[in-house]
Amino acid sequence: MKRILHLISSIQGNESYSYKLSKAIVNKVIEKYPGSTVEDVNLNDLEMPHLTPLILQSMFTPVDQLTAEAKASIRYSDEAVKQLMAADILVIGAPLYNLTIPSTLKVWGDHITRAGVTFGYSENGPVGLVKGKKVYIAMSSGGVYSEGPAKANDFVAPYLKSFLGLLGMTDVTVFRVEGVKVAGVKEHALEKGLASIQID
């Protein structure tokens, strides 16, 4: 039995390829671990604010010194960190928008990056504190970015692996539905992506 945190970032709703892929991954995880629980979080519905000076300052202020306003400013961050820490497995829907991740997913990442909570500092640099979690990324793209001439322009999978690794999540697997706008590829893109799912 696992606790699954399913993050949805596509603005296309249930019809998006990243959602269809991430949902299939969730179902495969449940097949492997019957009785698992799923927390679906649609980042588009949360309307998380971009970081502000108040939010950033509040993140670095001891809890017992926070004002009511400061506490309110980090409520989204506190909830996101709580959800993250409670999960055993993360499934992240990540469509490629303009060569990178949706802004909602970037904002989520900013809110869970908490010094002393999700990462710390050592004499050798940052140390991730989020340990023991498996992450599956469900990436979708109009073109083909896993190989070929466009590979250098994939700023989704490499970025997420690097960012998650910074926080200690290094067991990351990427599945893709790609080429959904490419003739001769799009016809079987979803089928190929779904068939590629293997749960460790």
Image (cartoon, grey):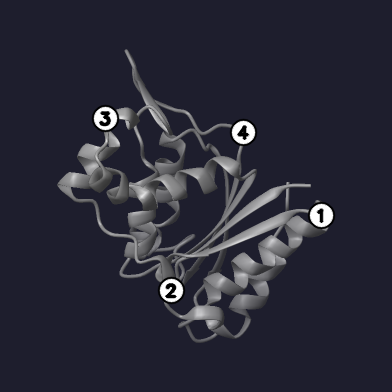
Q: Left or right: where does residue 28 sit relative to residue 93?
A: right
Q: Which of the two residues, 84 or 145, is positioned nearer the viewer here? A: 84
Q: Left or right: where does residue 67 sit relative to residue 140?
A: left
Residue shown at the point (73%, 64%) measured from the top left: 27
Q: First in sequence, mark 3 or 1: give its number.
A: 1
**Residue beneath label 1, please?**
35
- Residue 126, labelled with which disc? none
Q: Position of residue 18 (x, y in %)?
A: 53, 70
Cα–Cα span, label 3 and label 2: 49 Å
Residue shown at the point (48%, 60%) measured from the top left: 147
Q: Quadrant of residue 34?
A: bottom right
In the rendered image, the vertical position of residue 62 relative to residue 87, given as above or below: above
Question: SS at mark 2?
Answer: loop
Q: Where is residue 165 in the image (x, y as percent from the top left)?
A: 46, 37
Cα–Cα span, label 2 and label 4: 33 Å
Farthest front residue in view:
68
Question: SS at mark 1?
Answer: loop
Q: Which of marks 3 and 2 is in front?
A: 3
**What residue type is disc 2 on?**
Gly
Q: Where is residue 104 in the image (x, y as percent from the top left)?
A: 36, 63
Can I make out residue 185 in this image?
no
Q: Nearer the viewer, mark 2 or mark 4?
A: 4
**What residue type is disc 1 on?**
Gly
**Residue beneath label 3, please?**
65
**What residue type is disc 4 on?**
Gly
Q: First in sequence, mark 2 or 4: give its number.
A: 4
**What residue type is disc 3 on?**
Gln
Q: First in sequence, mark 3 or 2: give its number.
A: 3
**Residue beneath label 2, please?**
143
Q: First in sequence, mark 3 or 4: give its number.
A: 3
Q: Nearer the viewer, mark 4 or mark 1?
A: 1
In the rendered image, the vertical position of residue 64 relative to residue 141, given as above or below: above
